[in-house]
Amino acid sequence: MKEEQKDFPLHSFYGDIHASYDRVNRIFTFGRDRSWRKRAAKELLKSQPGRVLDLCTGTGDFLLELARQTDQTARGIKLTGFDFSSEMLKEAQLKQKQFQKGNRQVEIYFMEGDAGEMPFEDGHFDSMGITFGIRNLVYKNSNATKHLAEMSRVMKNGGELVVLESSKPASPLWRIFNGFYLRFILPYLGGLISGNLKAYRYLASSSKNYYTIEEMAKILEVAGFDLILSKSLFLGSVMLLVLQKR
């Protein structure tokens, strides 16, 4: 569910890189993205939600992490992954089949659609997670207000939103190193592996220039979400936010 932005055909980008997306993520984060998703999933499940939306689910890593943690505690839950890329969702569904071979009873659904017009009733979800996808919905995106309003609409009042995303580090020294890595290493490494340099130039640029944790919290506050928890990860290169819909 990475909505298109002006000059960035994200739909085709994600369609082109779906096969190598997970591998590049592992390399890019030095394998740390798995532990970040585990932590985000743990935070989301604390409120024991019944219906959960994983927005911009991509290849489904976060949704399946939720399913693993839910399965371990034997609690009933309905998990829905929503994304605009059919190619990314095919990868997610392959993982789902492998995950459910053990006759696990967690309800998992993947759906394709537009983040600005989701096919769910008002207040349908108890909680929502979005991992490394919200910047595509709000950063330099003319539909940002629409996306945020739709996220709020499909969540119940008092429901929790968990955001895991790239962040601009507070430390000037680390910001220089992080910027160098995102400008000169990731795009070419990702381009080499995926065969699409343009896609990874966009992804690296949007990560490098994205908001600070305080700026992101303020944007979501204006959209109707009150901050409960904020945590800087990876020396401030990644943010974890937990918010509650007013």
Image: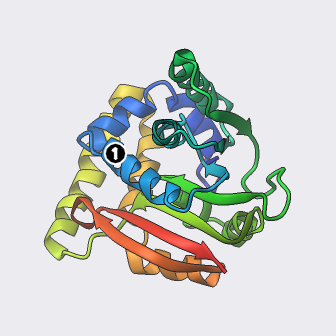
**Would residue 230 be found to the left or right of residue 176 on screen?**
right
Which residue is labeled 1 in the image?
33
**Would residue 190 be found to the left or right of residue 146 on screen?**
left
Question: Is 19 drawn above or below residue 151 in the view shown?
Answer: above
Residue in view at x 64 percent, y 51 percent: 52
Residue 11 found in image quarter: top right
> Which residue is more in the foreground, 206 or 163?
163
Q: x%, y% of residue 47?
A: 55, 62
> Which residue is more in the foreground, 107 or 129?
107
Residue in view at x 18 percent, y 75 percent: 172
Q: x%, y% of residue 36?
A: 35, 51
Q: Which residue appears farthest toward the front when viewing the image?
A: 74
Residue in view at x 55 percent, y 59 percent: 134
> Which residue is more in the foreground, 76 or 45?
76
Q: Give SS at disc 1.
A: helix
Question: Is 215 drawn above or below residue 84 in the view shown?
Answer: below
